[in-house]
């Protein structure tokens, strides 16, 4: 078994694509617009992952204006070389960290969080 992707629903697809590509350095792998069913799927992969690595799938239902995000979902996490470097890229794209930098509960690893345009949390672990 191999992990493929995590799907999240987004309200503003172009804003989300901009956040993940310009803010976090992800690359768009594919985009499918389904006019008859009125939805789009965009698959993105971190620029540091292998070509067959896991992806984030953004699902945009064209007629949906808002979602209620459940409180059971936590976050996705990515290892980064430097939180400050990611923060600079985020700030250049008009975003910033939502928490941190700080340390993990064990105190051994630096960490930070950033929220995407729909409020999904992304944990950044340095190392």
Image: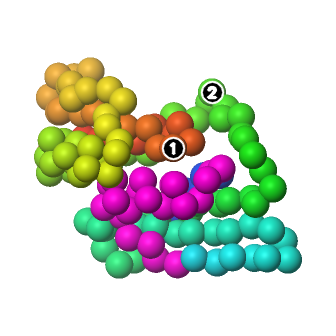
Q: Is residue 68 visible?
A: yes
Residue 41 on the magenta span: no
Q: Secondary structure at mark 2?
A: loop
Identify the image's colour scheme: rainbow, by chain, secondary structure or one colour.
rainbow
Give whichever of 47, 127 is nearer the camera.
47
**Is 35 left or right of 28, judged from the image as shown?**
right
Instruction: Provide residue 38's location: percent of width, then percent of height.
Output: 80, 68
| Residue 123 in view, yes or no | no
Q: Which residues are magenta?
A: 10-30
Q: Is residue 26 magenta?
A: yes
Residue visible at 37% across and 38% down in the picture: 114
Q: Residue at x 35, y 78 (%)?
A: 51
Q: Label 2: which residue?
A: 71
Disc on res. 1: none
Few, some or many residues within 10 Å of mark 1 (<14, 14–19, 20+): some
Left or right: 69 with respect to 23? right
Q: Position of residue 119 (x, y in %)?
A: 53, 37
- Name the residue carrying label 1: 117
What residue lies at 62% left-to-right and 30% top-to-bottom? 72
Identify the secondary structure beneath mark 1.
loop
Tell me the residue at 47%/44% (across/down): 116
Q: Decide which of tag 1 and tag 2 comes sooner along the chain.
A: 2
């Amino acid at each position: 078994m191999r992990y493929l992707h995590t799907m999240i629903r987004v309200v503003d697809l172009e804003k989300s694509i901009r956040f993940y590509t310009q803010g976090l350095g992800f690359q768009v792998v594919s985009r499918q617009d389904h006019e008859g069913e009125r939805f789009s799927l965009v698959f993105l992969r971190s620029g540091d992952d292998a070509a067959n690595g896991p992806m984030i799938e953004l699902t945009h239902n064209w007629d949906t204006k808002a979602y209620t995000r459940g409180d059971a979902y936590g976050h996705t996490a990515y290892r980064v070389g430097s939180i400050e470097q990611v923060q600079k890229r985020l700030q250049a794209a008009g975003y910033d960290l939502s928490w941190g930098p700080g340390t993990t509960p064990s105190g051994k690893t630096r960490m930070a969080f950033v929220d995407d345009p729909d409020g999904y949390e992304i944990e950044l672990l340095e190392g």
